[in-house]
Amino acid sequence: MKQELYRVVYCSRVRLSGPPAGIVGHLRHILATSRRNNVRADISGALLFANNCFAQTLEGPRVEVERCFERIQNDPRHSDVTVLEFGPASAREFPKWSMGFAGEPGAAHDPLAFVVFEGAFAGERPESGSAVLGLLHGLVRREEAWALA
């Protein structure tokens, strides 16, 4: 029996400190672990690191998405975890990515990401989940294009 596809979209404040090189090391570890675990769990998605925040979407079987998201909520590297969307999905937004990534520690603050994060954390914008998905699509596809160039 095929399991129903579910998606969670969330933002969190990052609790990593240190110089950019140290943060890069933490992010590489997070991505390597996530990619390995997500392939096993049939989860796809994308992660944005910007303005000292994470925005992420996870999509896959409900049980696996819930299990993964519970680990994230209990991870001390996250604070103010804010769910923007959780529920059934008709299709995967990131079918090719066990965990796509966009972001760069120490880079200038991204003004679009700032607006999306502030709206999400303030709970002012009911469309925040869609805004985060749109932001992730644009940034991850841009990163993919740069990697291929």
Image (tube, rainbow, N blue to C red):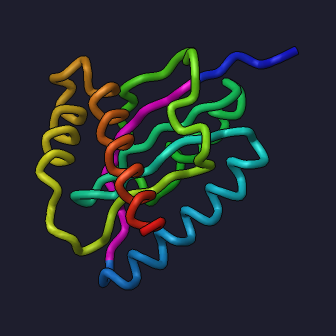
Q: Residue at x 70, y 34 (%)?
A: 64
Question: Up-down: is 79 above or below 108?
Answer: above
Residue at image point 32% right, 25% down: 130
Residue at 21% across / 71% down in the picture? 107
As for residue 99 lying within the magenta part, the answer is: no
Quadrant into which the C terminus falls: bottom left
Q: Position of residue 3 (x, y in %)?
A: 77, 19
Place of residue 71 in the rendered image (x, y in percent of width and height, measured from the top left): 60, 46
Q: Which residues are magenta?
A: 7-17
Q: In which image quadrant can residue 109 be found?
A: bottom left
**Left or right: 106 in relation to 5:** left
Q: Is residue 143 above or below residue 91?
A: below
Measuring 37% from the left and 33% from the top, which residue is drawn there? 133
Give coordinates of residue 89: x percent, y percent: 55, 18
The question of residue 11 being in magenta is answered with yes
Q: Does residue 146 sit above or below 9 in this rendering?
A: below
Residue 70 visible? The answer is: no
| Left or right side of 116 for 85 | right
Outermost front residue: 149
Residue 91 in picture, x, y percent from top left: 58, 22
Q: Most prominent secondary structure in the magenta stretch?
A: strand
Query: Quick one: 70 or 86, which is closer to the camera?
Result: 86
Picture quadrant where residue 6 is located = top right
